[in-house]
Image: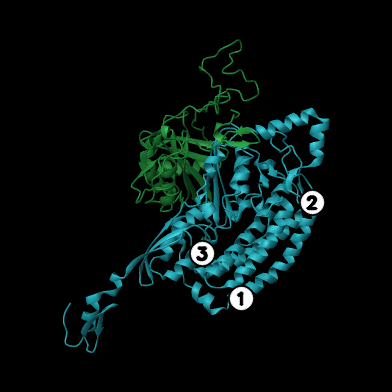
Amino acid sequence: MTAPDDKTTNGGVPVPVPPAGATSGAPAEHPPSSPAGRGMFGIHGTGDVSGFGGLVRQRSAIEDSPRPYGGYFDEVRDALEEAYPAFADAIEKVVVDRGELTLHVRPERIAEVCQVMRDDLALRFELCSSVSGVDYLGADERRLHVVYQLTSMTYRRRVRLEAAVSAEDPHLPSVTSVYPTADWQERETYDMFGIVFDGHPNLTRILMPDDWEGHPQRKDYPLGGVPVEYKGAEIPPPDKRRSYQ
Amino acid sequence: MTTSNYATERETTEGKVFTVTGGDWDTVVSGTDPINDERIVVNMGPQHPSTHGVLRLILELEGETVREARSVIGYLHTGIEKNLEYRNWVQGSTFVTRMDYLSPLFNETAYALAVEKLLGITDDITERANTIRVLMMELNRISSHLVWLATTGMELGAISIMLYGFREREYILDIFETITGLRMNHAYVRPGGVAQDVPDDAIVKIREFLKMMPKKLKEYEDLLSGQPIWVERTKHVAVLDVTGCLALGVTGPVLRSAGLAWDLRKTMPYCGYETYEFDVPTHPDGDVWGRYQVRLAEIRESLKLVEQAVDRLSKRGPVMVADKKIAWPAQLAIGVDGMGNSLEHVAKIMGQSMESLIHHFKLVTEGFRVPPGQVYVGIESPRGELGVHAVSDGGTRPYRVHYREPSFINLQALPAMAEGGLIADVIAGGASLDPVMGGCDR
């Protein structure tokens, strides 16, 4: 079995393909010829003013939140700092947003941090609710983020750990020895993002077929689909349609 | 092979046959080792009536004892999470409702709560919208547990309960049809509230249902609870204690059947659950019987919740946030062909107000923008913690949505339940997890 588009595979990893029309703001037949501004008003491409403009969103840089964070977040941070001597080295950022605490962890330290989060009496995150990935293509050099949602049943708290790896070296330690429930979830993250969890007992594909090429949830992996003809008009597949930026 | 004066052997078409006359049983038996010779691998599924959908189990058996069990999933993977990234935030509701097809309203509500948290409008959701969400979710919990009871009964050989369970579920689906226009795949709970108000005839139906259901529950218990086969097949079968549950991430009725009263409706309330009166049933044994008891008790608790929610509906009010940049402009209504734009709205935008038409067009085609960031929302679905991790990059489409599906997580516990037990108990144990493969594979 092959990935939907053979041209995009490169040893199983799809290489970025500039999507025609879908994000450039122009219909697929008229891709902008150059990114530089042209015309009187800096119009790109076809000068389409329908609202499907060629604006490109910038992802704002994530910054440390100032203390105090409020709620239980300060307690969690202090408890971790006290219980884990390598805190300064392992925790890259602490972000509080929308009432949720995110600790950005250096990928090679993630299993240690999880161990402390689970075992320390002041933290007690007994349950690993979820492990999944997010691909921040183009916004972060280490584009593949692994996101762990931990739940403390004792204190009724939640915290999110986030570890970022690059697509060229997508390795980080597995947390299955700390949270056995991460087994299938890490397999899914490997399957969908190609992130390799070192030390996982059986890191194989879980949702896609074993011989599948590429990792479908990566942002440079095409959605696929065929155009549909309806009453003489052709409707392109969802990822080829014009879209608002 | 030792030759013995006491046991003579001869070859038959079936293999060696010993005629044992003396006291040297041990040597004779060890010579053939029937158990290891007969260690066989059985592939069960993905098409099998007793695996709750397209779940494939690979079982290594010694006689009837399961030595190793491995589950294979992915047969129903439809890429819903990827597809969400190519639709706007409101369209997402119609996708997520198709994940776990036995609890569509939970999928929708979890998604809506996540989007609302990203938008920062969680506190603006109207009281009536929250009440309707609770009402719908609890009805859905009952229908989901009824399907569990029905299918588990059938898998363990009790056919009547299968018919009864589906019969009563049909009643709930009728109520859903009256309210949302559809039996399944409702797309009824939307970011910002719900699609439209509950019609009066639905209230009548729900009241009838509330009157009827306790009698039916009694009927189920009369059928099953004292039934010796049911008791034999479920008691002390597929035991998983609290430690095992937590290590494997198992939540929901399975965790509560092991004795831990962890229910997100109580421990981390949402949609105003903290204002309702209900109990969290538990059971000390952690076996299939315990899960049966917990689920039946949960149906009773859900009936209480439905009753309280219906009582609160007598107070009228809006069911969508007031913000016109988020609320769907069309006053949706149920017509003969399902849910659609109300005729008054169509008349207004086509005949009277150009601005309304533009607004309608912009909101429906472009959708609304969601400020960048990420959230995680967990709710208590019939199978455990249903979590949504939603990421926005500031656009009109989800950047990434991940579902923490309880079916997916809970299925990991199957080998822990099955290994060392009998093959018949694999069915009972697997069924007691209540996996829904549509949710598991997404």
**Which quadrant of the rendered structure holds the N terminus of chain A?**
top left
Instruction: Find disc 3 in the rendering and name its residue.
Output: B49
The color chain A is rendered in: green
Residue A234, horizontal then vertical, whole percent: 61, 33
- The first of marks 1 and 3 along the sequence is 3
Q: Which of the chains is cyan?
A: B
**CA distance for labels 2 and 3:** 46 Å
The residue sitting at 77% across, 48% down in the picture is: B335
Q: Amino acid at mark 3?
A: Pro
Name the one closer to the observer, B410 or A118. B410
Picture quadrant where residue B421 is located: bottom left
> Which residue ends up furthest to the front in the rendered image?
A232
Residue B384 is situated, as x and y percent measured from the top left of the image, at 54, 56
Residue at 39% over, 36% down: A13
State the residue position of label 1.
B223
Residue B236 appears anywhere in the view: yes
Give amino acid for label 1.
Answer: Leu
From the image, state whether disc 1 or disc 3 is nearer to you: 3
Does the rendering let one see residue B401?
A: no
What kind of element bears circle 2?
Answer: loop
Q: Earlier in the sequence, mark 2 or mark 3?
A: 3
Q: Label 1 crowding class (10 Å Cα cut-off): few <14, some 14-19, many 20+?
A: some
